[in-house]
Image (cartoon, rainbow, N blue to C red):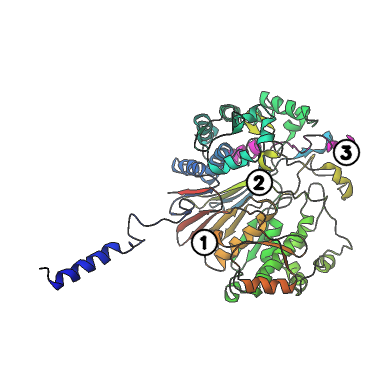
Amino acid sequence: MFSKRFFIILFLSVIISCATPDRSTSDHAPLPPEIGQDLQAKQGMVSSANKLASQIGVDILKKGGNAVDAAVATAFAVSVTEPEMSGLGGGGAMMIWLEKTKEPIYLDFYSAKRVKTYENLPQKGDDQALWEVAIPGEVAGLLHALEAYGNLSRQQVMQPAIDLAENGFPMYRTLAEFITSNVEKLKKHDGAKRFLLDGKPFPVGKLFKQPELAQSLRQVAEGGAAAFYDGPLTQDIIKVMNEGGNPVTAEDFKGYTVNTDRGLLKTTYRDWTVLSAPSPQGGLEVIEDLNLLEPFNLKEMGLPTQSDTTFHVLTAAMRAGVSDRKYIVDPHWIEAPVSILSSKEYAQKRAADVFRSPVEKNIPEDALNSLSQLKEPQAAPALEMAGGETTSLSVMDKDGNAVNLTHTLSNVFGGNAVWVNGFFLNNSGMRLSSVDEAQVKAQPDSEYWTRYSTIAPTIILNPDQTVRMVLGAPGGGRIDPAIVQNIIYILDYDMDPATAARMPRIYPAYGQWVNIGKGFKGEVIGNAYKKGYRFYPDLGGYARIYVIEKKDGHLRGAADPKHEGGVSGY
């Protein structure tokens, strides 16, 4: 007979064996669903839209590269793994922080059109099939950054991307989804058919190789920017563009240069310094929103998902930024009151109108008129805000240097899926026929016109002028609101980057309309409706955040869990 004590011991042992293991100590603890998209590290970190690309960036850091080397290597790698979002045929911008000299650098290499080539054409060429294709700035921008601020050679930085294109990677779901939704476009160009197999989308899991892209990358690695802007590769691009009705010339390619004279926008937010993108990129919206939010104790007010007061304050501030997008223009061609719009004084004067309740359809512009002494501030050409796709990456190295690089083809596969020698051409060009409606400078400062873009590479500094955070996002018109929300969740609400990235987002549209994510209390939305807000029935798209925060000597990074991105570090 077994004793009563035996059964008690047996019962307790069963209970103990069935207990859930401690997540902090067990090797077999359940993992969060976004494993690989949330990471802590000590020395260096890269967050990008693809785990393979992020690891390439970290490998560059380990080999003695700095944040710029890693950013450039990651960008070239992303052009292989996300060819629908960016690549040699695209462009972008980069915010750099050099810790040793405490110096911020902003490089604008967005794709641009040389106005002279189009100005005498009917409708300035905008009636042609490939009118939107601009001179790609990607190669010029990445190589300029590398040569000016990097430690390693072109070959060292570019070889991993060449190998990745040549050896291939398993086709993954997100790329396959974009291929599936663009099959008919991809069928139109012989090279683009590489993304199809027997006329159908390339299978998920099958090894996907891009030998033509590997060869183009190799040409750039060996010949530098000249290989892209003044060589056989250039002629191949021009031929395709000309056949599509775009009269681009060899001189247009030779004359393209990286804009290093844009400066950058700067403000303070509480104890931190915010550095963001100058016009014609979207940092003005980030700066303006934060200036409006600064007087509020957001944490004490509560989360916008739980508090209707906070919801109104946050939405109203971002709504103001959206309404002022019309002043984000290429300053080489049009003057706009950016210094006023980005000032604390403007935010103070405008606050009464911005936070008014009930919400009006349009926010009055009396504050701008009074400060600028302009009866009618100059407006930009009509904004082109069709849904765009972009990609972004953030890097921090062991020496405190930081980079956010955001680059794009504009629309998926550049809109038209025009493929040349392994890469797609952008559709980022300015609609020059709309220029007639704007007040253009009598003597423009450049031959090239860069259109407005919402991309906003951003770096935030601590009071001692060390980097606290670096972040950026793709997502068309949702980029800047997403950046602002992640900043306040990390700085005001003390969230880690991954938690901030998971928070439901608010995306104000023009007028009283708003897109929201799932997770807001019904009472909050009900009271917002009473204040005059109107809600779309779905989110209508999203912006993906790639962020790294340095706090208490540790790096914490996140790649937005809504996408197949990844963070790597060491």
Left/right of residue 519 with respect to residue 538 in the rendered view: left
Q: In front here: 487 or 443?
A: 487
With 44 as the anchor, is 257 left or right in this view?
A: right
The residue wearing badge 2 is 389
The span shown in magenta is 120-149
- What's the amino acid at mark 2? Glu
Find out whether residue 98 is within the magenta segment: no
Q: Work out which residue is located at the far top of the displayed protein and give it.
A: 232
Q: First in sequence: mark 2 or mark 3? A: 3
Circle 2: element type: strand
Badge 1 local density, few (<14 within 10 Å), some, or many (20+)? some
Residue 427 point in image, percent of width and height = 73, 40
Residue 102 visible somewhere in the drawing: no
Where residue 499 is drawn, which disc sits there? 1
Q: Which of marks 3 and 1 is nearer the N terminus?
A: 3
Amino acid type at circle 1 is Thr
Residue 505 percent across, percent down from the top left: 62, 61
Q: Is residue 122 magenta?
A: yes
- Check disc 3 and give the amino acid type: Gln
| x and y, in percent, of residue 570 in the image | 42, 49
Q: Distance between the residues labelled 2 and 3?
A: 27 Å
Q: Which mark is residue 512?
A: none
Tell me the number on the disc at residue 123. Answer: 3
C-alpha gap between disc 1 and disc 2:
24 Å
